[in-house]
Image: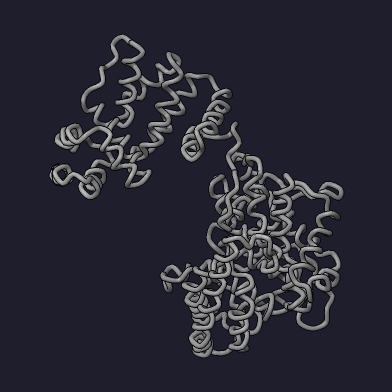
Amino acid sequence: MWARVNAPDSDPELVGPAALWHRLAFSPDLGTWKRADLRNLLLDRMPKVVEDPDAAADGMLPAVDAYLTFLSQTGRLTQRSDSLADLQAELDDVEDEFVDLMDELAEDGDDDADGDEEETGDLGDLGDFEPFADELADLDTIRLRPDSELAAAARQAPLIAKARDLALWVGSGRRVGEDTLLSDAEVEEALAAVGLPRPEVEGPIAEAVPYLWNIWNLAVDLEFLEPGEGSTVAVQDDTAEWPFDDDEDVLDAWMLGLHSVDYGDPELPDDDLTMALAGLTRGVLVRLLLAGGARDLDELARELAEAAAELDEELGADAWEAAGDPLAPAVDWLVGYGMVEVEGRTLKLTPLGTEGVVHLVDDADIEVDARPAIESMSAHELLALSAELPEDEADAEFAAWMRLREPARAAEELLEAAAEDESDALIRVQAASVVGTLGEAALPAWQAALKQPSLRPYAATHLSQLGVEGAPEPTQDDTHWLILDMWTISAGLGRSEFVSSLQDIGPEMVTELLEVIWKIPHAHVEELLDLISQVHPDKQIAKAARRALFKARSV
């Protein structure tokens, strides 16, 4: 929120990995930053974990600069930190080295893509999905559950309720401390507010409650907490309303906190050992997905222990042993976020967990075939999905979807979906094509579609073909609308396909169409005329398209 107003050119998403690794490696307090730590973070740590070197080279340093400025302006940069000016000076000093490192990573990535697929020694961490890209792509179609079902599960997530309770305890303007966010007395109150026990420790309690700080960070992720005036933090107005009534609002909030899965990674007293197990929780998720949603916990632990030892030959095995039961915090967090459940010694993805890990895989730019469950797929979802599938798969989706409803109802739903967006010619053509196969069962739907300007040409054509008494005959304008729809689809396939489609109908026909087609109130008529004027190899036709465009814009 602060970045949108004060640093609109920065990418806040790039701050997340830097802030997380700073917290793991250098200071549990997000507000304490030192020049030396900043240098080590950017030059030693980030090259090991960054997922997109090109994006990091362009945006990481501006994003970190904006974040540090935010901490300073809101009183979160503690007195133990170096000054903002010194930190910004350090960013300037490391810029060239950082960009060079990112360029090298990008080049190495290109080399790997050219055939070095066997090497796994350069993995970012245990949660890197890239080594599993081929296996994920080969998975059978994953069917995602309806939003209503997912929202019902998200409403029951204990961690979100704890984040809400913590935010409500924080209140409308709690001042945060300079050394730690909360005093020991406040920490005790906060622990009570979220139902956590007070640790029996000597010294500051704030340093012995990492789980509380994870819930604090989750409350920030969920936008339950936000910066207030001065050195204060405040609860958002609608936080008390969680769990929200609207399913979409619930899922939007849950997705905001999805990346909190990283908080499930083990935290050890030794920072280097902690980093050797970084990404463990994501590693659990991707392995569950690849196994069809369930794994034996002991078998999963052995596999991840081997992966940790292979990833970090010096510290991986030691870190695993030092953690005792490294999977325990990961599983605990995932259970609390509604993503997994434990049955005996078996760990299972919930439908909400499957939804979440599919989103994480997609965020990593890795393809996985995930689709809504047939029984919960809306007509519009079906049409949009089918547009991206090979013809035989699209036909199978349509067939499975229509087996669940009467033909008349299917026709009605498809045409209603096609009418939702007048600018979407592809959805419209697909819907009309499928409904056209339903014969007389589709008559009521076609007659209703006559009232929709974007569907009238299709309705009139099909009703005429069915010989319906009293049905309007297709007009010349209807024909022109159909042509504009087909041109729109052709243009979406690329310039060469568009030019080829124009040449297929011949220069005389194109010229005749340009004289009249500009009159049609089609959503894409102007851009199509403009495109013809730019790409058609016949200069006379290009000139005619410019004249038609002028007329269309003058109407």
Question: Which residue is pictured at 55% across the width and 35% down the height?
Answer: 377
Task: Identify whether 458 is placed above or below 295.
Answer: above
Q: Which image quadrant for residue 508?
A: top left
State the residue in front, 143 or 209.
143
**Res 519 seen here:** no
Spot occupied by residue 309 in the image (x, y as percentages of width and height)? 79, 68
Please, which colouring scheme is shown?
one colour
State the residue in front, 367 or 410.
367
State the residue in front, 177 or 426.
426
Specify the quadrant that holds the C terminus.
top left
Spot occupied by residue 416 in the image (x, y as percentages of width and height)? 42, 30
Q: Left or right: where does residue 344 sit relative to residue 135?
A: right
Q: How many marks?
A: 0
Q: Left or right: where does residue 141 sit relative to residue 488?
A: right
Spot occupied by residue 235 in the image (x, y as percentages of width and height)? 57, 65
Question: Which residue is pictured at 66% across the width and 68% down the height?
Answer: 124
**Res 484 seen here:** yes
Question: Which residue is pictured at 34% across the width and 42% down the height?
Answer: 497
State the residue in front, 159 or 138.
138
Task: Identify whether 150 is placed above or below 509.
Answer: below
Spot occupied by residue 237 in the image (x, y as percentages of width and height)? 53, 60
Task: Identify whether 308 is placed above or below 361.
Answer: below
Q: Left or right: where does residue 488 sit relative to residue 50?
A: left
Q: Which image quadrant for residue 164?
A: bottom right
